[in-house]
Amino acid sequence: MHSFKYESGALHCEEVSLDTIASDTGTPAYVYSAATIRNNFRRLDAALAELDHMVCFAVKANSNIAILDLLKKEGASFDIVSGGELYRVLRAGGAAGRCTFAGVGKTEAEIATALREGIYSFNIESEAELDRINTVAAGMGVQAPIALRVNPDVDAKTHKFISTGKSKNKFGIGLDRAAEVYEHAASLSNIQIRGVQTHIGSQILDPKPFAEAVAKLTPLVTSLKEKYNIEFFSVGGGVGIVYDGALESGDAAWWEKTNEKGRITPEDYAAAIVPLLKPLGLRILFEPGRFLVGNAGVLLSTVEYVKKTPTKTFTVVDAAMNDLIRPALYEGHHEIVPLKEPTEVPETMDVVGPVCESGDFFAQDRDVPPLQQGERIALMSAGAYGFVMSSNYNSRPLLPEVLVDGAKYHVIRRRQVYTDLIAGESIPE
């Protein structure tokens, strides 16, 4: 569910008109709903209440420190993949002792910083990484807490770019070799074996692959508990959200319908895996990202031109692929809605941006309410992997981010100006 809906003909985020925000901040701009994030976290946390658990927000989904602060106050821990993300968590008032550190390419500097700050656990992706962490820890005279990321070779049937749990993916250590690598870890003097971790992919709308992964790993987890007294099992993240029909999904009654479109609720997810996890007697870590923030955000944009050709209608907006790359990179779908409630029959069009790439589009041959020059729109479900993946391509300034909380809103990141684009650059004398 989310907090975006039409009221008196105008699209609102909670109690604030998005048209008001667009007028005040300009477009393009990202807008997030604090209530949606809180509700998503609380609902997932409640669904997992039978377990001793930690909900570790995947910072890569949305790393603004105001979002991290909001989640920290709800009781969230964090899943990070870089030293920069650890820095953000700390600046938001979070603690490294409530962070897991994932990622296949951790540098020595990142490892040392995480150890100094007291990281809860490193998710180990390879034997080479395990040895590096041991070496860095030995040089610092400390023990490094670790969990191997074990790849269960489960096909989550998601997009190939966000699949992580199959044997051909770059992530993790194969289930067939995990016990051997744990033995090696146990032989290293500066390694503390703390747990086991897995993550099979992202945007998964069926609970069955999660249950399959847990079932495949249970014998290993049980063995590791007996042998090394591990304290946690992290089952990763990956719970998907609604992109097609996103505006409709704000209606509470909508969630009670059957899963004919492939929807997964926190209760669906918990029902599939809690019975398998509870007998293990371990702390269970969850690493959701998109599920908590994806439907909590929109990208506001303004129509610059409507270009009609004999075969197509191109609606050119001021947002672009550098602002929201998911459609170009993943063929990701984002529902496109006007800020004024539409009354006319939809028209087939391409909605495109101004960047000089044919891949700069948000919709192709899609039925969208008729749009006129100067009209404002919202691209729904843009709260995850939106701003965090944006760039200055075509020398376009990065966008502002706005957080709505009830009847108030706050600019939590200012819009870049042109001088920001060349800050740090210099011309040789």
Image (cartoon, rainbow, N blue to C red):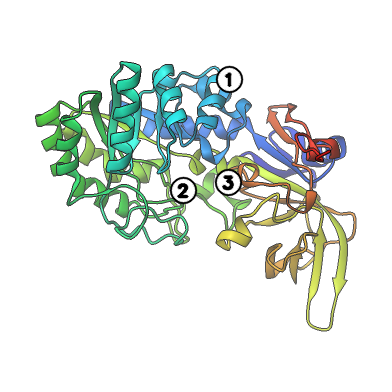
Q: Position of residue 367 (x, y in %)?
A: 70, 69
Q: Position of residue 23 (x, y in %)?
A: 87, 39
In space, the residues marked 1 and 3 are separated at their CA atoms by 21 Å
Q: Position of residue 180 (x, y in %)?
A: 15, 43
The residue pinned by badge 2 equals 256
The residue under the point 42% across, 47% down is 238
Asked if residue 239 is positioned above or below residue 47 in the image, the reply reads below
Q: Quadrant of the N terminus?
A: top right
Q: Position of residue 338 (x, y in %)?
A: 77, 54
Q: Looking at this view, name the residue that lies furthest to the front.
A: 429
Q: Earlier in the sequence, mark 1 or mark 3?
A: 1
- Name the residue nearer the viewer: 378 or 413: 413
* Secondary structure at numbered mark 3: loop
Question: Which residue type carries mark 1?
Answer: Arg
Question: Which residue type carries mark 2?
Answer: Glu
Mark 2 or mark 1: which is in front?
1
The residue pinned by badge 1 equals 91
Q: Earlier in the sequence, mark 3 or mark 2?
A: 2
Mark 3 or mark 2: which is in front?
3
The residue pinned by badge 3 equals 385
In space, the residues marked 3 and 2 are separated at their CA atoms by 27 Å
* 275 displayed left or right of 171: left
* 288 displayed left or right of 313: left
* Secondary structure at numbered mark 2: helix
